[in-house]
Image (tube, grey):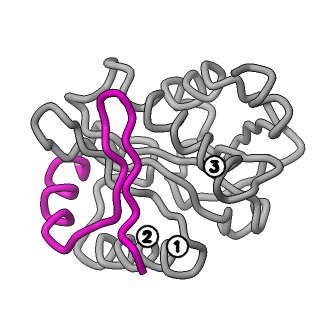
Amino acid sequence: MTEFRHETARLILRDWRAEDWPVFWEATNTPAVMRWLGGVQDDVARAAGETRIEGYGRDHGHTFWVVERKEDSALLGFCGLKRSNQPGGPQGMMEVGWRLREDAWGQGYAKEAATASLDLAFDRFGADEVIALTVQGNTGSWGLMLRLGMERRADLDFDSTDFGSEDPRIIAYGITLDQWRAAA
């Protein structure tokens, strides 16, 4: 299988390498980054996360890819696509997701990577619609969903304590192929 690599103006989205994982966890497994994602992960949760992410690529041809900054090859986090699989939530729908280290926030990297991922979802992977999931309190995440042109999909909301018990409601946004093309 050929290694996945997709470039944007400032970023490279690519497959994971074994040496990426320690760098990724050091940069993103922090209280600030993990605030809305269930908190800082222990060794068992990190290993399970790695297995899931690698499995998405193997099983579907797409995953949450490494986001690398071209300028200095810094690993900023991940962004990409998976099939929605959270218990209680919409099953099998194409889902875009991202997680960037804190010092990469507010610089447009997440939007650039998510835009590339949505292009890939529709153009390469044949999606008719892509969803994104977060919790109500994560205003940065759903704010990006709005900036991407996604619309609120309350019909897909569900409850899950996987990301913390503070607010178990998972909220959904979505964008169709026609909406994406119209916004381009």
Bounds of the magenta segment? 1-29
Query: Residue lying farthest right?
Result: 155
- Mark 2 lies on a secondary structure that is helix
Query: Which quadrant would the C terminus be assigned to in this image?
Result: top right
The amino acid at mark 2 is: Ile
Position in image of residue 63 (x %, y %): 49, 63
Q: Quadrant of residue 171?
A: top right
Q: Residues within 10 Å of mark 2 (few under 14, many from 20)?
A: some
Nearer-N-terminus badge (3/2): 2
Residue closer to the observer: 37 or 181 = 181
Residue 117 vs residue 49, the one in the foreground = 117
- Residue type at mark 3: give it: Pro
CA gap, disc 3 to disc 2?
23 Å
What amino acid does circle 1 point to?
Tyr
Q: Secondary structure at mark 3?
A: loop
Tell me which residue sits at (42%, 32%) in the image: 110
Which percent across, then down, holds residue 102?
25, 32
Q: Residues within 10 Å of mark 1 (few under 14, many from 20)?
A: some
Using the image, determine if residue 173 lies above or below residue 148: below
Q: Which mark is residue 168?
A: 3
Q: Earlier in the sequence, mark 1 or mark 3?
A: 1
What is the number of the mark on residue 176?
A: none
Name the residue at 68% across, 48% down.
123
Front residue of 32/103: it is 103
Is 7 magenta? The answer is yes
Residue ID for mark 2: 53
Residue under label 1, please give it.
Answer: 56
Q: Residue at x 31, y 25 (%)?
A: 105
